[in-house]
Image: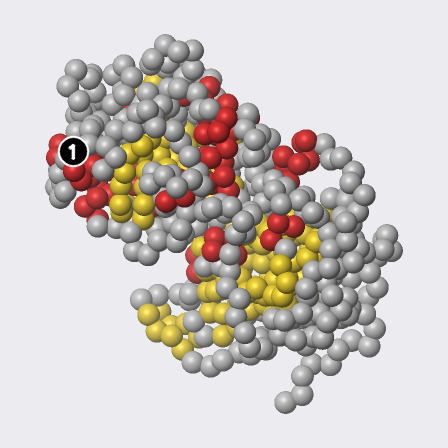
């Protein structure tokens, strides 16, 4: 059957300054062309604010990152920041770094000594986690050869720190998250300076986010409120698809405050920030008691009261109270740990976008020709009913021009300056070397009861010469009919530039039964081009 007829005339790109030199004008070959010939422009200083904001994008492959773990997830609990000062006893065991040296097969929380031993024992009993503690006197590091370096872990728990982090430690934490790690921050109320050194947990956490060498411009999209709320029973929002509220350890209905604080959310600074549990009478951007966010390819969670993790038993001489078994605190802590360590998908405002490629794993480059657009027959029968398998995107390889897509003028093109992955047409976002934003989107309905997988081939080339700052970015997102972001699947940047195409794949099963829009947004600053080229898309269900 003949392929679709191409339009006789292509829309011209808007008049702009000439493009920089981009991918080499090689033959259009599958996964072979597009070697980036980068032209260095005269350096123009950028403001530090712009550099900080741009650095939020994911950096692929250059920095040390948490190695992919198979089966067990690795979680490190901190004890370097006076987590046992005063009546605090926020350790999973007195045996450090390895809690199993105290008891290799704990069955109850008192088998390990510490006021958060219930947390550790619950994870240990699943057989899915390897736990360690960073002992007092050690330092938080990332990218070193140490056995307790963050690069060896999937998630790091910082339970009510009482000592300011050093500059090197703040850099380590930010790089850990940016490159795929999960960070669990637990604050306490304003004035909770347990070791009387002038720094309590709200100050320490705010200092991490506002005074670090990686991104000090509100990187996570939240700040700790300087409050002391004596008591409250915060309630969880309704979101059945959220993996923290409805995760492997149960559903979360609410939490508890016994001298705690809340957080102010700033989605304009980080669109992935999401309040999950709110103080009574609050919603939206204020009064969040538990919140999640993403940064680079990593995840962040924050909780406003350390009494929620206190299981009531610990070291001798401590005055402790059982908050762990109050409300849904246990499920909230455990589900969040699972999400942060990568054991469950979704999160932030991503209610159904678990990445199996893209920013989480860097994607996989495969050979062969991607034809796209073929709807295969067959039915899949499962617990959710009957699902007809198929490919949902119209004109997935762009060979019919703009058909099925909403795109900025000139984005869908057959220009020879950027070879397609297959065929002649592709979507070329940005690449002008001046300040501009380009979008590409398509709306689809994902049938109920279906699993769904989004894939696309992506090529990035750039004239930027930096190896550390993301000046130009491409976001892959899922949005609703009003344009609100439901999930940010990945953020790419000039730092991800490479020859050839790489396939990126994301699980969208969490959006089954919904009509959603898959949207790509490319943003380029005023200096030096970066081109984001997308081809051979697919949204397969079955």
Q: Is residue 188 visible?
A: no
Q: Position of residue 471 (x, y in %)?
A: 67, 43
Q: Is residue 267 left or right of residue 289?
A: right
- Which secondary structure lies at badge 1? loop
Q: Position of residue 401 (x, y in %)?
A: 73, 71
Q: Quadrant of the C terminus?
A: bottom left
Q: Position of residue 505 (x, y in %)?
A: 50, 62
Residue at mark 1: 112
Q: Position of residue 79 (x, y in %)?
A: 31, 27
**Foreground: 126 or 307?**
126
Quarter holding residue 5 = bottom right
Q: Residues within 10 Å of mark 1 (few under 14, many from 20)?
A: many
**Foreground: 454 or 214?**
214
Q: Quadrant of the N terminus?
A: bottom right
Residue under the point 44% across and 75% down: 388
Work out whether 264 lies above or below 507: above
**Foreground: 92 or 289?**
92
Residue under the point 41% across and 17% down: 200
Q: Is residue 521 left or right of residue 361?
A: right
Q: Is residue 83 visible?
A: yes
The mark total stands at 1
Q: Is residue 108 left or right of residue 472?
A: left
Work out whether 449 lies above or below 42: below
């Amino acid at each position: 059957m003949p392929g679709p007829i191409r339009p006789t005339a292509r829309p011209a790109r808007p008049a702009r300054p000439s493009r920089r030199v981009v991918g080499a004008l090689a033959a259009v070959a599958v996964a072979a062309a597009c070697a980036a010939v980068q032209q260095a422009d005269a350096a123009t200083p950028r403001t530090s604010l712009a550099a900080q904001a741009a650095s939020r994008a994911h950096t692929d492959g250059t920095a040390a990152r948490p190695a992919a773990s198979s089966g067990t997830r690795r979680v490190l609990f901190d004890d370097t920041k006076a987590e046992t000062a005063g009546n605090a006893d926020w350790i999973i065991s007195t045996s450090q770094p390895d809690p199993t040296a105290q008891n290799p097969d704990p069955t109850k929380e008192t088998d390990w000594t510490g006021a958060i031993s219930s947390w550790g024992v619950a994870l240990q009993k699943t057989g899915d986690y390897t736990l360690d503690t960073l002992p007092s006197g050690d330092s938080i590091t990332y990218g070193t050869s140490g056995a307790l370096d963050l690069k060896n872990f999937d998630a790091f728990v910082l339970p009510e720190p009482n000592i300011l982090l050093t500059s090197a430690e703040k850099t380590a934490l930010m790089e850990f998250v940016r490159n795929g790690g999960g960070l669990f921050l637990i604050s306490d109320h304003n004035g909770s300076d347990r070791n009387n050194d002038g720094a309590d947990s709200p100050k320490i956490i705010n200092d991490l986010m506002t005074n670090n060498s990686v991104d000090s411009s509100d990187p996570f999209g939240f700040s700790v409120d300087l409050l002391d709320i004596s008591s409250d029973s915060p309630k969880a929002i309704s979101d059945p698809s959220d993996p923290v509220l409805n995760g492997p350890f149960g559903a979360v209905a609410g939490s508890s405050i016994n001298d705690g604080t809340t957080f102010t959310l700033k989605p304009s600074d980080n669109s992935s920030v999401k309040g999950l549990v709110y103080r009574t009478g609050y919603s939206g951007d204020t009064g969040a008691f538990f919140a999640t966010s993403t940064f680079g390819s990593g995840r962040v969670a924050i909780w406003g009261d350390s009494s929620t993790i206190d299981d009531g038993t610990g070291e001798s001489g401590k005055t402790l109270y059982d908050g762990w078994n109050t409300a849904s605190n246990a499920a909230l802590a455990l589900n969040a740990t699972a999400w942060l360590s990568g054991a469950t998908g979704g999160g932030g405002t991503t209610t159904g976008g678990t990445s199996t490629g893209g920013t989480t794993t860097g994607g996989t480059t495969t050979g062969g020709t991607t034809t796209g657009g073929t709807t295969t027959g067959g039915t899949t029968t499962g617990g959710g009913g009957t699902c007809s398998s198929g490919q949902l995107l119209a004109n997935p390889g762009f060979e019919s021009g703009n058909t099925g897509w909403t795109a900025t003028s000139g984005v869908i093109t057959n220009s020879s300056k950027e070879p397609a992955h297959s065929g002649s047409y592709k979507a070329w976002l940005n690449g002008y070397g001046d300040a501009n934003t380009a979008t590409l989107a398509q709306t689809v309905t994902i049938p109920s009861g279906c699993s769904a997988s989004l894939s696309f081939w992506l090529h990035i080339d750039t004239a930027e010469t930096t190896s550390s700052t993301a000046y130009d970015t491409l976001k892959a997102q899922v949005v609703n009919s009003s344009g609100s972001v439901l999930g940010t699947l990945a953020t790419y940047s000039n730092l991800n530039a490479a020859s050839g195409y790489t396939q990126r794949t994301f699980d969208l099963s969490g959006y089954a039964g919904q009509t959603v829009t898959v949207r790509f947004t490319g943003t380029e600053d005023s200096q030096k081009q970066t081109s984001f080229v997308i081809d051979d898309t697919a949204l397969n269900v079955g």
